[in-house]
Image (cartoon, helix red, strand yellow):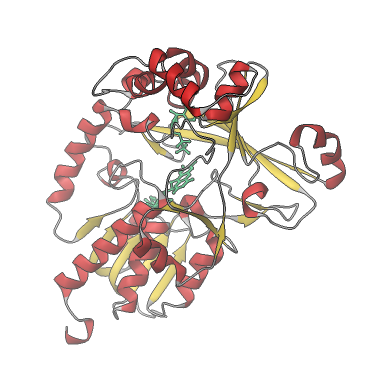
Amino acid sequence: MVEDESTDFLIIGAGFSGLVIGEQLAKAGWKCVVADRRPHLGGNAYDKKDEAGVLIHPYGPHYFRSNSQRIVDYLSQFTEWQPVAYQIKSYTEGRYWSFPINLNTFEEMLGRPSTSEEFEGWLKKKRVPIDQPKNSEEVILSQVGRELYERFFEGYTIKQWKRHPRELDPSLCARIPIRTNRDDRYLREEFQALPKEGYTAMFERMLEASSGLELQLGIDADEARARWKHRHLIFTGAIDEFYERRFGPLPYRSLRFEHESFTAEQLKPRESISGKPGFWQPAMQVNYPDAELPFTRIVEIKHATAQKIDASSIVREFPKDWTPDDEPYYPVPADDAAALYQRYAELAKGEKHTSFIGRLATYRYYNMDQVTGMALAEASRLMTRYGNPNMT
Ligand code: FAD
Ligand code: UDP
């Protein structure tokens, strides 16, 4: 426990980035204070039980996945894992579709059995020949053609981003796999699992294991910087906010979440839709590409957590414009946003005693494993730079 009001490292943000770097530096013997303006740790990955007792992801679904054994091994010090094959559906034209696009989707379209060969032949005819897709529209057109692009991607993307897929980076829609076999998992990564008791429990264990790491909640960066003298600052909040938006605000997309819980009794009439007792919908996540509906997806996380409970809870996600009163959930993957970010990144480069890590501080559409990797790398850079704490 740190008792005086000075620390070696002051870390702003108690999400994946801030906690991982804090754990590493504290383990090396440095004093660290992690301050977050929210009343809880975990950042957007925070989970908790709602009033019905269902473990929910209040800031939207967080599906852990990784191709890095090193990152999985690191986090495994603090959690066991619940393997999950993340499966979702898309709902449009009045029906559920297998999604991401795979052989089952093709059969649903044809209304009869088919084969990978037939689907591949069909795609060959439909694909728009584009060698190097320059945007998210081209990336999908080049893989599946216009019909499937319009059915599953165009409306969803416009709703989510209020920008046309043509104005968005190819990497955005390229996140979604397209397969001609029956593999209908939403994600590509080798390791797909949730922390067995949830993210919050994993982070709490991380803190317990780190005696030199002090967590301070409900405190803003400015107040924390004034309160704790520090030799180095690690900032994981929004980089434009750090610089008081002097070049103008970076664009973000925000979300409004509408949570709803159901008792076992209330779930009974849904059985014909969900296909099993105790569930509201037929998959962990259902995407709604239709423009008429104001939400993009409904998530029923109990499908993934496999929590043994009769009740269930869902959350609808309504995309919204970001204002300074909203959480900046998504950096916008577009050229104009990247150019503005570069101006802030130039300022950040000149800071000798501040590191910028994480999704908001580097303005990158990073997943949890990627920000974990970034935090581990920065911790090792700082340890090399500052040496052994017992020698200073
Ligand atoms: P954050 O989790 O955003 O944490 C930053 C923390 O800093 C916050 O707690 C914030 O309160 C605090 N903070 C910011 N500014 C200040 C300030 N000025 N003063 C004090 N505190 C401050 N990733 C996946 O791998 N799989 C998924 O399925 C997935 N789904 C997602 C769904 C949604 C809706 C969203 C928004 C993100 C999703 N992500 C997912 C991404 C994931 O949330 C991030 O990769 C990860 O949480 C980033 O961690 P971080 O610590 O960088 O940032
Ligand atoms: N997307 C889409 N239709 C879908 C699912 C995704 O058009 O049914 C596009 C959309 O632009 C979305 C992007 O692919 O923002 C990435 O989707 P993902 O589910 O990975 O987004 P996240 O979980 O990060 O919100």
Image height check: is 320 above or below 285? above
- Locate residue 188, reporting x and y percent: 43, 44
Q: Decide which of 225, 348 is in the foreground and name it.
A: 348
Residue 120 spot, x, y in % from top left:
44, 23
Query: Among all residues in the image, which is located at the extreme bottom?
Result: 390
Name the residue rendered at 43%, 52% in the picture. 190
Left or right: where 95 falls relative to 256: right
Residue drawn at point x = 76 percent, y = 32 percent: 273
Q: Quadrant of the N terminus?
A: bottom left
| Residue under the image location 15 percent in, 45 percent down | 347
Rendered view: 223 above or below 114: below
Residue nearer the viewer, 381 or 309: 309
How many marks overall?
Answer: 0
Q: Is residue 56 visible?
A: yes
Residue 357: name its quadrant.
bottom left
Residue 296 in view: no
Residue 126 is drawn in which quadrant?
A: top left
Q: Is residue 28 above or below residue 362?
A: below
Above-or-below relation of 48 to 322: below
> Which picture quadrant has residue 283?
top right
Task: State the image coordinates of residue 250 (x, y, percent, origin top left).
Answer: 30, 34
Q: Is residue 67 left or right of residue 271?
A: left
Quadrant occupied by the C terminus: bottom left
Q: Residue at x 41, y 53 (%)?
A: 66
| Image location (x, y in percent) of residue 211 | 41, 80
Residue nearest the observer in this picture, 242 or 333:
333
